[in-house]
């Protein structure tokens, strides 16, 4: 089997390629730049065949996929700067990346007879209430432009071929790139106190754990919609920060505030990011480990403990 992974200069794509190579699966990676520009950590991703590909160009997508001819594509590339996506001057670029790029990839993958795995987000829902979102819920109502484009990406993936997986994730952290944990560690080292919202509820997702699941998934034909975050229950960003500092041995005081009190975000954030993940076990997939374990392993990976 040959698997093409997009977005390998990012957190998730980096770990997915490494997981594929670890299992002896033929892999190739793509990203925007002509040469691999992710972390130079000596892992398999830095030695894997790499293709510069502009997913917003149908010609570029067709050229690379015709050369690689993958049996499956794991599509990790996306515009993920949620606040910047709200700027009108960025709308066309965000749309081209998250919607058109996904459509080009999904349609070409289908033409080649391959499987297509699309990474999506809890932002496709309206973020209200307290009921965990089900993978097959269709009551979408994204509250920001990023969420709108990710939903349209889902629809593009699902319409291209029945051989699709759509995996929604939330609160992602990994080695290769920026994330909430790295931000809070940096802030905690320079401030005695930090203010963190306590009325947005969800569960973190460690890319190292998620990569294992995605590879498990793409080796099957159990197509459809899934939710995947680490186990361990639903928490707030405040709870998340407290645990980060506890494990890291930091004494920074964390002050809980409401979203309204915090008031800095340009894009509306979901209050309810609870994702029901029971469908994973129902389909024979091993759930991700508990999030506290994931945080500890990640802090060790980046040398903070």
Image: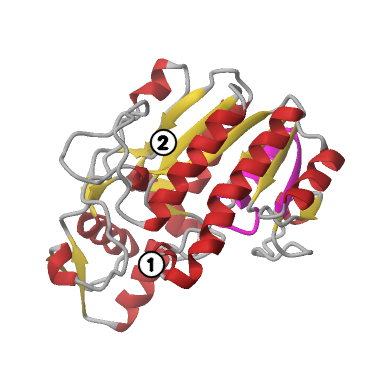
Q: Using the image as rendered, state which of residue 219 and residue 51 is in the foreground.
A: 51
Residue density around tag 2, few if under 14, some if 14–19, many if 20 or more, within 10 Å: many
Image height of 225 relative to 77, above or below: above
What stretch of residues is rendered in magenta? Answer: 8-30
Q: Is residue 69 magenta?
A: no
Q: Is residue 137 left or right of residue 168?
A: left
Q: Position of residue 125 (x, y in %)?
A: 31, 42
Between 13 and 113, the residue placed more toward the observer is 113
Q: Residue drawn at (29%, 52%), measured in percent from left and top?
A: 143
Q: Does the residue at mark 1 contact the one at mark 2 (Cβ under 8 Å)? A: no
Q: Secondary structure at mark 1?
A: helix
Asked whether residue 262 is in view, the answer is: yes
Mark 2 residue element: loop
250 left or right, relative to 118: left
Name the residue carrying label 1.
83
Image point (61%, 30%), residue name: 160
Q: Earlier in the sequence, mark 1 or mark 2?
A: 1
């Amino acid at each position: 089997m040959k698997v093409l992974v997009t977005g390998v200069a990012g957190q998730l794509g980096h770990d997915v390629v490494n997981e594929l190579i670890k299992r002896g699966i033929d892999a190739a990676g793509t990203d925007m730049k002509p040469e691999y520009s992710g972390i130079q950590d000596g892992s398999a991703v830095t030695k894997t065949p790499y293709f510069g590909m502009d997913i917003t160009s149908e010609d570029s997508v067709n050229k690379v996929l015709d050369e690689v001819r993958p049996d499956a594509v794991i599509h990790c590339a996306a515009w993920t700067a949620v606040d910047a996506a709200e700027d009108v001057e960025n709308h066309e670029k965000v749309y081209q990346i998250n919607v058109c790029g996904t459509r080009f990839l999904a349609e070409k993958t289908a033409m080649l007879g391959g499987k297509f795995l699309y990474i999506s987000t809890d932002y496709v829902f309206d973020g209200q209430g307290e009921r965990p979102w089900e993978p097959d819920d269709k009551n979408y109502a994204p509250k920001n432009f990023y969420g709108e484009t990710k939903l349209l990406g889902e629809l593009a993936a699902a319409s291209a071929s029945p051989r699709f997986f759509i995996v929604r994730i939330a609160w992602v952290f990994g080695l290769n790139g920026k994330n909430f944990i790295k931000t809070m560690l940096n802030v905690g080292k320079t401030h005695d106190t930090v203010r963190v919202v306590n009325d947005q509820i969800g569960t973190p997702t460690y890319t190292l754990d998620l990569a294992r699941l995605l590879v498990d998934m793409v080796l099957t034909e159990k197509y459809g919609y899934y939710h995947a975050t680490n186990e361990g229950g639903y928490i707030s960003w405040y709870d998340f920060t407290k645990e980060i500092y506890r494990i890291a041995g930091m004494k920074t005081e964390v002050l809980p505030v409401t979203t309204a009190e915090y008031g800095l975000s340009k894009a509306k954030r979901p209050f309810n990011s609870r994702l029901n993940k029971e469908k994973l076990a129902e389909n024979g997939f091993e759930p991700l480990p508990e999030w506290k374990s994931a945080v500890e392993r990640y802090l060790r990976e980046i040398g903070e403990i």
